[in-house]
Image: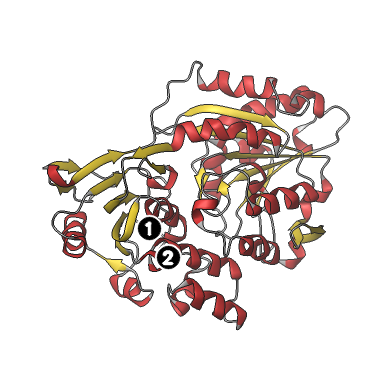
């Protein structure tokens, strides 16, 4: 037997027969040539398709820093001192610098969460606010861009001479990769813009998006963020231990492109073939199922049709703080049914429909059974929304063997939310 342990307190390990185990796969540990501080300093000193930050700030009156939120493990507290040092050297005082937390459609961050994200003393030095995505008074119209996106973003963006976004680049289902212009779209946009660009994803297979920089959704995001006035990005790539192994600074689109090879190297794993059963943990994306869905998306790339995916995650805040009620009301269904319900006006926010279509792609459309091991969502609620449940990993594996057969091959994806599986077989 091979013992598989999970990165959560109180969660039982799983014993997998050696003959059934295809392998245990996780993002590689990288060995960068320089320390984290040197990586960050070097990125700022060698911008991509842009002036160095200090030079770019010459003659500017004020700066808006946009940080990703508590749903991302980006070490913003480590990155900020380098950015603030450049701003200070450019002669811009603290009173002319503001920070906004790019929540997208997530819940507001608490003062403690903000302090933990930004680092000691930052919240006390600068004006810091949460983006309010559903507050019309918080938004302004920045224009209409291809392919049919009305760009409504945080109104504070039009009040600053220079806007820099801080984030992380890693593969993801919705638009290929996180980072880059995502900090604005969906980070600082309103509900219509979020719905419009997410809806571009509908009808495009996941295999044509995840792990691919150039795709229609990314184009919509880039066009929208540039229209809104994003000046530059400062993005990091994290390895399998969550350490900074690369960074890029510069033009929002070109710097992001430059960071993609780094991200692929840090997040790609190769499987010999698709597994019958995929066991995946969501760490460190465990706040809610809305976030853990990243692990499900990636696990779906590694499982055969008709197979089983076991997701192990606390889902501390349930299905979704902001969209949970809508998910419970409608339940996870086929892509066709979700699209029909959108056309009938049954959704309050289309972004929830896109999330549900992603789940359908990973499960219903492939005949895949999803079994969730979690203490954050009651079993009755999981049944209500058409997700499977098991009280612990051993029970989940027993149920999976019952579905896939005793000879089923099992692949384990550690940190599945940030692991991009590639399949060798053709």
Kindly check if marks 2 and 1 are in contact, taking CB atoms under 8 A apart as contact. Answer: yes
Q: Nearer the viewer, residue 108 or 1?
A: 1
The x, y position of residue 369, in whole percent, is 30, 65
Question: Neighbour class for label 1 at 10 Å: few (<14), some, many (≥20)?
Answer: many
Q: Residue at point 67% right, 33% down? A: 255
Dot label at residue 319: 2
Quarter holding the C terminus?
Answer: top left
Image vertical order of residue 259 relative to residue 416, above or below = above
Q: Residue at point 19% right, 50% down? A: 12
| Colouring used for the render | secondary structure
The x, y position of residue 248, in whole percent, is 63, 29
Is residue 19 among what the camera can see?
yes
Q: Residue at point 18% right, 63% down? A: 399
- What residue is shown with label 1? 315
Q: Residue at point 23% right, 49% down? A: 410
Question: Neighbour class for label 2 at 10 Å: few (<14), some, many (≥20)?
Answer: many
Q: Is residue 174 found left or right of 315 in the rendered image? A: right
Q: Nearer the viewer, residue 380 or 225?
A: 225
Q: Nearer the viewer, residue 206 or 372?
A: 206
**From this viewpoint, which residue is outermost toward the top?**
33
């Amino acid at each position: 037997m091979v013992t598989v342990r999970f990165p959560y307190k109180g969660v039982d390990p799983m014993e997998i027969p050696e003959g059934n185990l295809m392998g245990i796969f996780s993002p590689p540990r990288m060995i960068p040539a320089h320390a984290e501080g040197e990586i960050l300093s070097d990125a700022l000193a060698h911008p991509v398709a842009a002036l160095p930050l200090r030079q770019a700030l010459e003659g500017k009156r004020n700066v808006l820093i946009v940080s990703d939120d508590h749903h991302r493990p980006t070490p913003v507290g480590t990155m900020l001192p380098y950015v603030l040092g450049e701003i200070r050297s450019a002669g811009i005082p603290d009173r002319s610098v503001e920070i906004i937390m790019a929540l997208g459609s997530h819940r507001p961050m608490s003062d403690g969460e903000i302090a933990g994200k930004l680092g000691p003393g930052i919240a006390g030095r600068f004006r810091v606010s949460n983006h309010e995505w559903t507050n019309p008074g918080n938004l302004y119209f920045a224009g209409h861009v291809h392919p049919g996106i009305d760009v409504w973003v945080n109104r504070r963006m039009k009040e600053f001479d220079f806007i820099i976004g801080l984030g992380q680049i890693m593969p993801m289902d919705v638009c290929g990769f996180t980072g880059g212009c995502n900090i604005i779209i969906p980070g600082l946009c309103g509900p219509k813009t979020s719905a419009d660009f997410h809806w571009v994803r509908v009808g495009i297979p996941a295999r044509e998006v995840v792990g691919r920089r150039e795709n229609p959704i990314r184009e919509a995001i880039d066009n929208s963020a540039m229209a809104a006035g994003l000046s530059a990005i400062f993005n990091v790539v994290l390895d399998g231990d969550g350490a900074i192994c690369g960074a890029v600074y510069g033009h929002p689109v070109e710097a992001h492109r430059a960071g993609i090879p780094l991200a692929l190297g840090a997040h790609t794993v190769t499987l010999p073939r698709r597994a019958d059963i995929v066991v995946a943990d969501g760490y460190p994306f465990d706040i809610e199922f809305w976030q853990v869905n990243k692990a499900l998306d990636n696990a779906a790339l590694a499982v055969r049709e008709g197979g089983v995916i076991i997701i192990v995650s606390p889902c501390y805040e349930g299905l979704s703080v902001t969209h949970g009620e809508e998910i419970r009301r409608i339940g996870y269904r086929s892509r066709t049914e979700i699209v029909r319900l959108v056309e009938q006006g049954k959704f309050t926010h289309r972004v929830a429909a896109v999330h549900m279509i992603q789940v359908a792609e990973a499960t219903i459309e492939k005949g895949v059974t999803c079994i969730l091991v979690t203490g954050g969502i009651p079993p009755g609620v999981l049944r209500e929304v058409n997700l499977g449940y098991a009280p612990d990993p051993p029970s989940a594996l027993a149920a999976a063997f019952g579905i896939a057969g005793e000879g089923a091959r099992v692949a384990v994806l550690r940190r599945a939310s940030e692991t991009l599986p590639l399949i060798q077989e053709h």
